[in-house]
Image (cartoon, coloured by chain):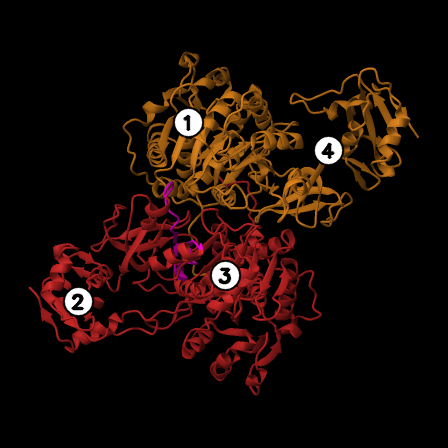
Chain colours: A orange, B red
């Protein structure tokens, strides 16, 4: 029986109109360093969004689902692109300015961006790439920066403000869109292979923003001011720009002032109530505040995600500066909200900590399951380990544009029945809390059971003589894989493998104990400072390591 | 360009599984009067929901989109029907036990209910109707009540607990549903004509529940306990049952104990944080608390809707008992959340009151517009009056089951472009706040302008000699319609029409002043105590009123 309800699509257009009309007095404030911040109301941003849509269509000829790239900081111009491009039916392609230049060129070409809107300060990054960008016809420059870098480039160059000036700002004939059409495109910066594109739909962006606004999530209201430190080129700044327009929440945009000192300054001056960012940002803020305290009392909730947050960072920020971090888990493929670690009902203080430093509960709309090592699904008992698989209306089902231009679904990324395989390994407790224990590529698959490399490393590093420890899987005839323990001893401490193994034996199950041990002066690391386990596995395979077998 | 996102439908099934699995420890507590409350966890409710689905399908043969009616109070058994019936693909038809018996029979027959689940205490209402209910094959009785009333009735009678007992409680093969299929059916109790059915979709119920959980709405979280005083047969108890399962919010169910004294008792004992109900409920609670105060401090937000709430009631509950009422506006056709009156940013105390006693802002997802008297759309200037029209994914587009079984769209209820015509007349301020001034059937359409009958009545009743005043539209050759003022003077006060008109002339625009006046000893009222303007208009047309023309 069909319902009698209206069939109104969930689109970015509706968020734009709601924010600009119902919450016209809310503000987008962009930090400018030493100068007066740039302040625009949602009403003004809405009017400029209409002008931008006219400019893109009437002047630059953007039609249909063409891609408009943005290489921009978090600022109010970027907000206008966020709203205008999807609302006119085109696709917003946010460009990660931290990608290596060749990957940046790759994703612009792969997405076939026709227009790039770029902040002037980022021209030194974009200009050298332009000769390699075949599809880009227009470059629109916003904000301060050296335009001479674009002299002689092939695409037509426009000034953002000139492009908008004088165009109608009261109406645009926004098309009626299918909510399953793409609104925004974001590429993963995977460590292996080419970046892969996730094409968010209007529907997924809308539903995700509703979830962000749930009281049990970020809980944005018109009484909040939200500081998205997470860049707008990282998974749509976790959906915060859309959520703010939906809730009528004022925004504080850091622009390029992401260093700890200006961040602390803008927080003290503009008093945001909610923020979100990666652990590195909050670690930098902690150091800054320790050196020069500022008033952080405006913060109600600060979300930390993108990587596991060190518990010491959470405790120190809370104890010393009154900033409460809430851990969240997700990835580009999950829009990103996958879980949040608010403590269970009734738990506070010390009792709550074990629940706050894990990944937390999935919100309604996100279904989790644990794929067991040998097939099948693990129970939620807090002990059975599996690869986390996810399903829901804001979870990706495929990647954008494979060989034949069709979406593609690599087997290692999607289950047969369509769930996203996250590559994260963990357990789920009976109360719905997810705790990650490893990455699936690093887990040791030994005789049908999984051994967490991270768990072994953490236990080894608790030994007073161990400076660093990395554990990787190596092939084993009998068990398939077994752990290899790589240790770096502290200066002046002798390495005694049997003693280390005995130490470990008191802390983990016997069958998990490594037989193979090796010692290094330092463990190879990736560009972001993580143990480079690929290198370790390769060195082992090439016989380059001095391995001792401890029975 | 199609997105790469998963196409996961928004269904009641997903809410059921989320609540029962991720928030299994949350509770549904049902008040039992003097006895110990009945407490069930979401996990237990989930297991019983699975048993109920098995019973309905395997024992009673419910298939496809057949209708299952519920004639029940707010209790945990009713919650199980709420979750089981839509999740198995059938349609939950909530029966309003306050309807006149002939209307109750009408809607059961119109919806062709095959099964009715009924609370034992409501058998005196249902039993006499059974001979007139052609489609009902099974009656399932839950809770205490006199079963002998059903002796000899045609439908098969079942005991709820016996029906569930022994059935599998761990799994049901829930069908994959189209989110646009009907989940629940609710009939309006319109004052004119037959009740009309609104068939909510899984999608509309899901999206509406997400909005209920937004921080700027009810804002439910696992830390809340929600007391739905609004009956589950009134617009799905404003979506609260679904929202609670989505957010992991414990519920306090009043069952049939809706009188002020037990309500105050259960609030003091069980400490709910959020509630919702009509003004009458809170007026009763105020009187009760004035007589015998109870601890109401657990309340964070109490929503009042269904009718305009007298400001004095709001102020007295807040000043005397610390209970803050928040006004909301909506109707059966709007699921019902249409707007909420949280005060604008930065306004508190006296300054906030003018905004708290009107209808408030629409949430994202609800679009409002004001249809002007002469056609066209009114601006949001706080002055231009129009009929409120609404659009959105949880707003109805038609009514269920017209003459040919198809949905039907009466012209007075829907605009040509598909917006719902609410029948409410009002203004919208530039900050997005809606203020209702009249019902469209009561507004006086005079020379292309609208005159609010309510405004004239309120001003007249401010005169020290006037006990009651009703204003209705009467035909006028020159202006189309003009206001007729009907007054009841206080005992011992003489009626002086010119003086009353002069009094009014100081308060409203000159062109709005009534020329026609009449005096009564009492104004005819409807069964719920409102002025019966239909009767007044009929009396005027029949020449039964003694009308004085005051030039």
Q: Is residue B326 magenta?
A: yes
| 3D distance between C-alphas at marks 2 and 3 | 44 Å
Provide the residue designation for mark 4: A441
Residue B68 lies, in percent from the top left, at 54, 70
Residue A534 makes an appearance in the image: yes
Query: Are labels 2 and 1 assigned to the same chain?
Result: no
Q: Which mark is residue A30?
A: 1
- Point out the residue furthest to the right here: A551
Q: Are marks 3 and 4 in contact (CB under 8 Å)?
A: no
Provide the residue designation for mark 3: B294
Prevailing secondary structure class for the magenta stretch in the rendered image: loop
How packed is label 2: few (under 14 Cα within 10 Å), some, or many (20 or more)? many
| 3D distance between C-alphas at marks 1 and 3 | 49 Å
Question: Residue at the spot x=25%, y=45% of the render?
Answer: B381
Chain containing mark 2? B
State whether residue A145 is above or below residue B470: above
Chain containing mark 4? A
State whether residue A493 is above or below residue A406: above
In the rendered structure, which segment of residues is drawn in magenta?
A: B322-347
Residue A470 lies, in percent from the top left, at 77, 26
Q: Which mark is residue B485?
A: 2
């Amino acid at each position: 029986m069909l319902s009698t309800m209206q069939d109104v699509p969930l689109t970015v257009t509706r968020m734009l109109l709601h924010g600009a009309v119902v919450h016209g007095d809310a503000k987008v404030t962009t930090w400018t360093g030493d100068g007066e911040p740039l302040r625009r109301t949602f009403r003004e941003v809405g009017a400029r969004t209409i002008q931008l849509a006219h400019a893109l269509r009437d002047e630059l000829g953007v039609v249909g689902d063409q891609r408009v790239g943005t290489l921009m900081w978090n600022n109010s111009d970027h907000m206008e692109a966020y709203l205008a491009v999807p609302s006119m039916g085109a696709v917003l392609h946010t460009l990660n300015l931290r990608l290596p230049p060749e990957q940046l060129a790759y994703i612009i070409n792969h997405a076939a961006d026709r227009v790039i809107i770029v902040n002037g300060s980022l021209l030194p990054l974009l200009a050298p790439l332009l000769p390699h960008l075949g599809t880009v016809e227009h470059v629109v420059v916003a904000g301060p920066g050296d335009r001479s870098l674009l002299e002689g480039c092939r695409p037509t160059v426009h000034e953002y403000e000139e492009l908008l000036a004088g165009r109608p700002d009261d109406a645009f004939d926004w098309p009626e869109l299918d909510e399953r059409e793409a609104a925004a495109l974001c590429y993963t910066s995977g460590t292996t292979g080419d970046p892969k594109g996730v094409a968010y739909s209007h529907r997924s962006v809308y539903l995700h923003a509703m979830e962000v606004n749930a009281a049990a999530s970020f809980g944005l209201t018109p009484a909040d001011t939200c500081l998205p430190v997470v860049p707008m080129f990282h998974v749509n700044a976790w959906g915060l720009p859309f959520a703010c327009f939906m809730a009528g929440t004022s925004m504080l945009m850091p622009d390029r002032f992401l260093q700890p000192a200006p961040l602390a300054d803008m927080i003290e001056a503009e008093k945001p109530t909610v923020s979100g960012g990666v652990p590195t940002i909050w670690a930098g803020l902690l150091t800054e505040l320790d050196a020069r305290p500022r008033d952080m009392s405006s913060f109600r909730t600060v979300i930390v995600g993108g990587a596991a947050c060190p518990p010491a960072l959470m405790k120190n920020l809370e104890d010393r500066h009154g900033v409460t971090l809430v851990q969240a888990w997700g990835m580009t493929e999950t829009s990103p909200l996958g879980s949040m670690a608010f403590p269970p009902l009734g738990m506070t203080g010390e009792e709550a900590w074990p629940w706050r430093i894990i990944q937390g509960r999935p919100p309604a709309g996100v279904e989790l399951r644990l794929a067991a090592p040998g097939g099948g699904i693990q129970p939620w008992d807090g002990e059975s380990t599996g690869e986390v698989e996810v399903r829901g209306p804001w979870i990706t089902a495929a990647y954008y544009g494979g060989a034949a231009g069709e979406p593609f679904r690599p087997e290692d990324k999607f289950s047969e029945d369509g769930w996203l395989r996250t590559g994260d390994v963990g357990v789920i407790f009976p109360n719905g809390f997810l705790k990650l224990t490893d990455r699936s590529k690093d887990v040791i698959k030994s005789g049908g059971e999984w051994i967490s490399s991270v768990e072994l490393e953490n236990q080894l590093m608790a030994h007073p003589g161990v400076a660093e420890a990395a554990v990787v899987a190596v092939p084993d005839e009998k068990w398939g894989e077994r752990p290899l323990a790589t240790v770096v001893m502290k200066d002046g401490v002798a390495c005694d493998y049997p003693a280390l193994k005995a130490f470990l034996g008191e802390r983990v199950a016997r069958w998990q104990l490594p037989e193979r041990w090796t010692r290094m002066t330092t463990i190879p690391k990736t560009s972001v400072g993580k143990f480079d386990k690929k290198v370790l596995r390769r060195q082992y395979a090439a016989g380059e390591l001095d391995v001792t077998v401890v029975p």
